[in-house]
Amino acid sequence: MAEHLLIRAAFRQPVERTPVWMMRQAGRYLPEYRAVREKADFLTMCKTPELAAEVSLQPLELVGVDAVIFFSDILTMLEPMGLELTFGEGEGPRFPHPVRTAADVARLRVVDPAEGLAFVGEALRLCRERIAGRVPLLGFSGAPYTLATYAVEGCTGKNFNHIKRWYYREPETLRPLLEKLADQVALYLNYQIASGAEAVQLFDTWAGALAPHDYREIAAPYTRRVVEQLHRDGVPVILYINGGGHLLEEMATLGVDVLSLDWRTDMAEARARFGATHALQGNLDPCALYGTEETIRREVARILEAAGPVGHIFNLGHGILPDVPVENARLFVRTVKE
């Protein structure tokens, strides 16, 4: 049986208590993170193993979470493939030369992560060394559809006009992009596992904007293609889709171990439908951490009761917000542990 609570929960094995961590747990709500951020821009932090490892471990030391997820961004993986990435202050990620044609797709390279993303491997090795067995180390990647959305739109969008236009007009020329991204994601996650990641999470952030029949066509096959290539002996795979409650039936067919729920999804209903085959992760509304101590304790108790004692990893339903009081984050983690 696995040593760590989170790994055991992911495989629906008995646990003494529910493990807890937070998406975006290494972030601006921590003064210590902001101090590092003042010394380096976001991409420099991602690409400097010492800085990435430092901020990755802050939530373990300062908040008491049951897992460390290494500090990076889902989009750094696209740079070695041939896509220039910029992060402007206050404007988020941008690709100045988005992928819009079959010729653009043909120019993208599937590369060895040990060459183009060696800083990720080094950051993971540093994290694993400094964790010293206390909690598991999580790796992650964007899922192929979400990565394609960024690459095609060129930035964060709301309507996803470009990729949906491509899908509805010329799906046969979009599929090679998704296939190429799926193979790169699989290589990337296997590299993370080889570098020390003990569980991995796929973020399909923008797939929640798809109807179920479109998800089956344009996203699900490529997530499955990733999962089937993973070297995952003893390494659980978590899948998160923001706004993905209507896609859970499809998500459950993709071979992952854990379905990560956003806060809009009813935990008790999800447990009744999928608890016999999948662990569940989530799903406190991130805004609940603005609440009073009484509110936070009540919401934690509600979700714990709905999820049951086996096969549940407590998390937020999305990333922790940057202006949440640190003490409320600590209270949340402490309450789950109690």
Image (cartoon, rainbow, N blue to C red):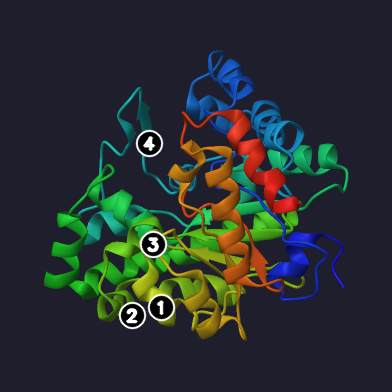
Q: Is residue 47 left or right of residue 144?
A: right
Q: Between disc 1 and disc 3, whose residue precedes? A: 1
Residue, x 65% and y 39% (percent of image)?
331
Q: Is residue 219 above or below residue 273?
A: above
Between the C-alphas of marks 1 and 3, the distance is 25 Å
The residue that disc 2 covers is 216
Sort mark 4 into few (<14), some (14-19) or many (20+) by Cα contacts within 10 Å: many
Disc 2 from disc 3: Cα separation: 21 Å
Residues at discs 1 and 2 in contact (Cβ within 8 Å): yes
Dot 1: element: helix
Q: Secondary structure at mark 4?
A: loop
The residue drawn where x is 47% and y is 45% is 288
Q: Earlier in the sequence, mark 2 or mark 4?
A: 4
Mark 1 or 4: the one toward you: 1
Residue placed under numbered mark 3 in the picture: 264
Q: Amino acid at mark 3?
A: Arg
Task: Assess whether mark 4 and mark 3 are in contact (beta carbons under 8 angstroms).
Answer: no
Tell me the tag on residue 85: 4
SS at mark 2?
helix
Q: Quadrant of the N terminus?
A: bottom right
Considering only vertical position in the picture, is 46 above or below 200? Answer: above
